[in-house]
Image (cartoon, helix red, strand yellow):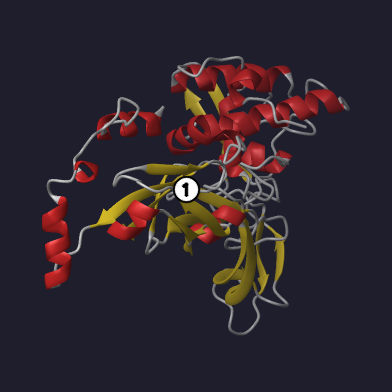
């Protein structure tokens, strides 16, 4: 089933400003908030979709990727933000402040409307993955070694003694309007509601150790240089029983091909043939990104002719089919001639078969370029 457009979910246009995006999300989130719609699965799903849409559109970089590639730009994501399957705790920890005081406590209040304990999320990790055109053409699974922080074996945490597990501290201040009570994030546990209890040997002050792990990354076909994919939950872990790990962000880097040049989903290839082959015609075997193909070069082929192999280019990341493989014919002029060869060409200078005679059907260079982009 096709995913719903993020702009449609929030009821805004593509030209909406960041202020308009935030306003639209707040309106949708309050309307479908779990506290306002208890045990309503449909409202909960709409609440999650609104958060997913806001997470992408509120980030200028992610919004630009979405505008260019649609949902396909985030197909490498596995859970969490940017890939569907939103988690309620993630939503409140990431966007809780957007509700203001609408649900008491100013933090969303999911599941009761009172003060809630924040779930601490670990930091993200970033890596680069190099791909060849062949990898991009077919999609590929890459296994990479990642050094990430994880909770040490045997570590235990206990309820924070400062906030009693709420993650918040209440402060009472006297103002000209009277006594006012405000909630702030606990200075001891930073909102986690937990603090270190038992620290195993070799762990740091937060009970964490560094571990090397092999992570499998499924990269969809048709990705482009600079696209960032996300593997949910494979970043650094955070301390605490109720913490959630960060994400592994994968930046795609395209390795230049020795003979092929990419242009979007199209592939360009320069094929050099000699003068005799151009005159007499010949069959040639050409290596594309998906395998070898045999092409026929007709007798009398002119240098600059472009042969188009439809659908033999790269797949579109938006799943709109495949690009083309464009073969640019270049007739190689010999640099040195034997005495007999020179004599032959001197005799042919006055031969009408060797005189240029372009036909109206023979397109100019600029017309060929125009056709390539049309």
Q: Above or below — where is 54 with respect to 30?
A: below
Q: In the picture shown, does residue 175 fall above or below 182?
A: above
Question: In what quadrant of the picture does the C terminus appear?
Answer: top left
323 left or right of 79 in image: left
Tell me the quadrant of the picture where the N terminus can be found: top right
| Residue shown at 67% from the left, 51% from the top | 78
Q: How far across and down, in percent of the image, does residue 276 sit? A: 32, 59
77 is higher (above) or lower (below) than 240: above
From the viewer's perspective, tell me whether residue 346 is left or right of residue 19: left
To which residue does mark 1 refer? 224
In the rendered image, is residue 182 in sight?
no
Q: Is residue 118 visible?
A: yes
- Residue 35: quadrant of the picture: top right
Counting from the top left corner in percent of width and height, residue 240 is at: 67, 61
How many C-alpha atoms fall within 10 Å of the one at disc 1: few (<14), some, or many (≥20)? Answer: many
Q: Secondary structure at mark 1?
A: loop
Question: At which x and y percent is residue 191?
Answer: 60, 48
Residue ranking furthest to the bottom: 201
Q: Residue at x 63, y 68 (%)?
A: 215
Q: Nearer the viewer, residue 192 or 360?
A: 360
Q: Quadrant of residue 158?
A: bottom right
Of 29 and 78, the residue lying toward us: 78
């Amino acid at each position: 089933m096709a995913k719903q457009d993020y702009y449609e979910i929030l009821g805004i246009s593509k030209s909406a400003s960041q202020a308009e995006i935030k306003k639209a999300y707040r309106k949708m989130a309050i309307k479908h908030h779990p506290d306002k719609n208890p045990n309503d699965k449909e409202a909960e799903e709409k609440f999650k979709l609104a958060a997913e849409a806001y997470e992408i559109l509120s980030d200028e970089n992610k919004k630009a990727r979405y505008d260019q590639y649609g949902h396909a730009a985030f197909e490498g994501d596995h859970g969490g933000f940017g890939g569907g399957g939103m988690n309620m705790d993630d939503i409140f920890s990431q966007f809780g402040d957007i509700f203001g005081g609408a649900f008491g406590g100013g933090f969303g209040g999911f599941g009761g409307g009172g003060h809630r304990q924040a779930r601490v999320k670990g930091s993200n990790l970033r890596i680069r993955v190099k791909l060849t055109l062949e990898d991009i053409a077919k999609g590929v699974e890459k296994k990479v070694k990642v050094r990430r922080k994880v909770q040490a074996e045997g570590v235990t945490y206990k309820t924070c003694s400062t906030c009693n597990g709420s993650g918040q501290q209440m402060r009472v201040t006297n103002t000209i309007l009277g006594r006012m009570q405000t909630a702030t994030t606990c200075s001891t546990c930073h909102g986690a509601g937990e603090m270190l209890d038992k620290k195993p040997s070799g762990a740091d002050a937060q009970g964490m150790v560094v571990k090397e792990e092999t992570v499998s990354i499924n990269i969809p076909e048709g990705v482009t240089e600079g696209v960032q994919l996300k593997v949910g939950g494979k970043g650094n872990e955070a301390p605490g029983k109720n913490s959630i790990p960060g994400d592994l962000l994968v930046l795609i880097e395209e390795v230049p091909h020795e003979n092929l040049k990419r242009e979007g989903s199209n592939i360009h290839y320069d094929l050099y043939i000699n003068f005799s082959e151009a005159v007499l015609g010949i069959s040639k075997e050409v290596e594309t990104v998906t395998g070898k193909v045999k092409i026929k070069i007709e007798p009398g082929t002119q240098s600059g002719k472009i042969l188009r192999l439809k659908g033999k280019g790269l797949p579109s990341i938006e799943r709109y089919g495949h690009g083309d493989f464009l073969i640019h014919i270049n007739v190689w002029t010999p640099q040195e001639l034997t005495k007999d060869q020179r004599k032959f060409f001197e005799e042919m200078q006055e031969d009408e078969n060797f005189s240029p005679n372009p036909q109206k059907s023979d397109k100019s260079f600029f017309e060929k370029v125009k056709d390539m982009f049309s």
